[in-house]
Amino acid sequence: MSDEQTKEFTMSAGCCSAHPVTQDHLGAALSSAGTTVTAANHAAGKTVGASAEILVVGTIATGNPAAPLAEAMAISGGAIIGIGALKDVEGLVDSSTKTVKPEGVVVPGLIEPHMHIWTSLLNLTWTDVSHEVCATFDDVVAVLKTAAAATPAGQYVLGKLFDPSLFPGEPDLTLDILDQISPNNPVIVMNASMHYLYANTAAFAAAGITYDTPDPVGGNFGRADGKLTGVIGEAPAMMMVLATFPKPSAQELAAGITEILTECAKQGVTSLREGATGTLAGVSELAMLHQLNGAKRLPVRVSTAQFAIMAGKTPEQVAQTWKDAGVTPFSGDEMVRADAWKVVADGSNQGRSGYFMQPYLGENNGGHGNWTPETLRGAIRAGLNDGWQINLHTNGDAAVEMALEAMEEILPGSANADLRHAFVHYSVTTDDQLARTAKLGISATFLMNHVLYWGAAFRDTILGAERADRLDRVASAIKAGINVSLHSDYNVSKVHPLLSAQTAVLRRLQADGSVLNAAESATPAQALAAITRDAAWQIHADDRGSLEVGKRADYAVLDSNPWTSDPESWDKIVVNETYIDGTLAFQA
């Protein structure tokens, strides 16, 4: 890849790629884990016997359409050896069997097929001022004021996930507003797109930046009427403002990773895919995950999608780097496993860096791709030739088209054509693209909270009604024959699979309560499959996703059965416990 192409890719960085600010602040601590990848293999030596070690008795929603309900489940060696009526499994019980009767409904462990650990660590502890928390711009200001009041003098007041596109008029957090929030403490707020920061006078002073400081190449400091506006654009300028911000230790990052995974377990998740491993520190990220799992079994199983980009290397060289470290398809253990190759075709739609065939509303451009057609094919082949499942981030319809054309050329002649390759986000599509995706056997995973949180903004100010109606077309994808799953893209939105499933069914917009193209609504059964067995299939976790004989005893205990309840209530269902291999991973 040329220097110009590398620069273009970096400037489009967002949820699924390495942001230079995050790389700068976390890279050294992550790299301290080294590059030796050692699997813990906690399950080594466990054998599946003829008698149950654990008998789960109660209401069991299996997630298996052929036998949706059961009253008993027998577990041995972490696997299900019997499930059905109590009388059907009593023969598997002996004097050593432990019988448990959960308080709630037992359901398959939920699957989160695309989220981000590493790029979420930078601002994990920052104050959340997302639209999910702050319904109005005034709420954003109020929440920051509360945070400032609780911050000791001289320390940073930090906010994250501010998204002006979700508020009328797309207001900025200006220097004047932030000075009123806290005139003495440095205040820094990060835009949800990660293309902008907002800072007050004290933050600029701490960084030594004045009105006369020249803009760095590729970045800018907003100026008006002889003073700084407080708006800082793009990574080079953002890094200057954050230059004096303390960097975390490896121990702090380890605690952050554990916190993120525990939050996933709290939502009933037993397996997830980290969607861009290697973005910040290469192989060291995977090494750290294995080290944490070696010290104590992780609360969630983690699959990783290896990133096709490392600083100064071509995708082919990156592929060799992973191989040299012993990271090959499906290497690892039952808790941490490498199984995909991640390529990012474009940016973020709400950040207006997604790649579209037509311009954004009120603009003269529709974003751009992160690659030329030739270099995109090279990045895909680098992973495909080594036997990786391809995960292609595609947001805009032009990015989908570019990715489709590449896969149509590459897959038919590949020995690795049938590895459940997936388009990630697959946000805005045409009927023709759906048909061609199905023909190739490519699956799709949808960020359903695009609809919930940004649907009105896409319709009214970013894309327009016609393109917004083509957003997250779950029903049409299934009808076309595409296997689908639902994801959060954390920290773009919170890990909450039941909320994603609810949105797939209702397609209701948070902004005004209207429904965005009801024809694209999934059925309740389709939506629940997309966060259980179909999502498990997509991440090559065939031993999970439903409760059946031969599968792992990964399950959650909920206060209500989503398979028999109204989807209107799904987001309010409480997770009481989460289990992996029949052993407790989380308890409320």
Image (cartoon, rainbow, N blue to C red):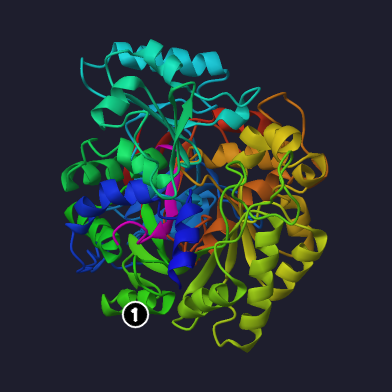
Other residues around mark 1 within 10 Å, as few (<14) / some (14–19) / many (≥20): some
Residue at (74%, 58%) from the top-left corner?
478
Decide: is 494 above or below 189: below
Between 349 and 178, which is closer to the camera in this rendering?
178
Q: Position of residue 571 (x, y in %)?
A: 57, 31
In the rendered view, would you say 391 is above or below 85? Answer: below
Magenta highlight on residue 272 = yes
Which of the pair 211/380 is nearer the observer?
A: 211
Per the image, the residue denoted by label 1 is 320
Residue shown at the point (69%, 48%) measured from the top left:
472
Q: Quadrant of the N terminus?
A: bottom left
Where does the C terminus fall, quadrant-wise? top left
Please report the residue visible at 37 percent of the width from the left and 40 percent of the height from the top.
214
Which quarter of the figure has residue 283?
Answer: bottom left
464 horizontally vs 326: left or right: right
Q: Is residue 571 left or right of residue 300?
A: right
Residue 88 visible within the image: no
Looking at the image, residue 423 lies above or below residue 125: below
Q: Amino acid at mark 1?
A: Gln
Numbered-mark total: 1
Query: Which residue lies at the image location 57% right of the left edge and 70% below the top edge?
Result: 421
Give x and y (percent) for residue 331: 34, 73
Question: Which span is picked out in magenta?
Answer: 265-281
* 148 relative to 366 in the view: left or right: left
The percent coordinates of residue 289 (x first, y second) are 27, 57
> Against 176, is 381 above or below?
below
Q: Secondary structure at mark 1?
A: helix
- When asked about the image quadrant of residue 125, the answer is top left
Q: Horizontal and vertical percent for residue 349?
A: 62, 46
- Residue 493 visible in image: yes
The magenta stretch spans residue 110? no
